[in-house]
Amino acid sequence: MKIVLRLLGVAALIALGIVIYRAVRQYREDSVFDLGSGTQSSPPSSSSSGGESRSISPELLAILADPGDKGPVELMRDSEGKEWLVNRRNGYRYPVEDGIPIMLLEEGEKNRDESLIIRQE
């Protein structure tokens, strides 16, 4: 009987070790896909604390489209350091706050800049 209990105890310890190993491995895999992990060397901070804000990850930027004409947008930074997603076909600019694009038509119209439009002839 003692042998059976010892074997059960050893099996329980091995099972606990496997669970901990899998949890650590899953955490490491999940942390690879953090937003903006490749574009930022310091941990994210709040924009109100005066720290550097998060940027849009290249993967997200590749799939974003202007909500009006469904065309691609490009990431630009203005002279004040604020990031914008720009549609060069109509001059709409969409703000990016802490790595989150505000892709509303109202925001694009409100922040329209005629000088950003590229004329194709």
Image (cartoon, grey):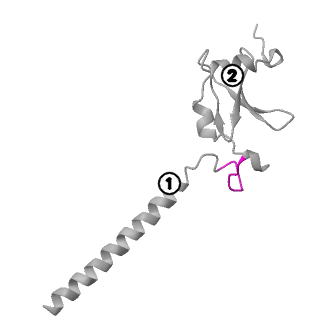
In the figure, is residue 81 to the left or right of 28? right
Residue 59 can be seen, yes or no: yes
What's the amino acid at mark 2?
A: Glu
Q: Residues within 10 Å of mark 1 (few under 14, many from 20)?
A: few
Q: Position of residue 31 (x, y in %)?
A: 54, 55
Which residue is found at the position 60% from the left and 24% from the top?
Answer: 65
Quarter location, residue 77: top right
What's the amino acid at mark 1?
A: Asp
Q: With respect to residue 13, does 21 lie above or below?
A: above
- The residue labelled by disc 2 is 107
Does dot 1 land on a helix, a strand or a loop? helix
Which residue is found at the position 71% from the left and 56% from the top?
Answer: 42
Point out the image quarter for the C terminus: top right
Q: Which residue extends farthest left? A: 1
| Magenta part of the chain | 38-46
- The residue labelled by disc 1 is 30
User: Which is closer to the viewer, label 2 or label 1?
Assistant: 2
Residue 52 can be seen, yes or no: no
Q: With respect to residue 22, does 98 lie above or below?
A: above
Q: Nearer the viewer, residue 28 or 5?
A: 5
How much space separates mark 2 and mark 1, taking CA atoms?
Answer: 32 Å
Does dot 2 land on a helix, a strand or a loop? helix
Q: State yes or no: residue 45 in magenta.
A: yes
Q: With respect to residue 12, does 65 lie above or below?
A: above
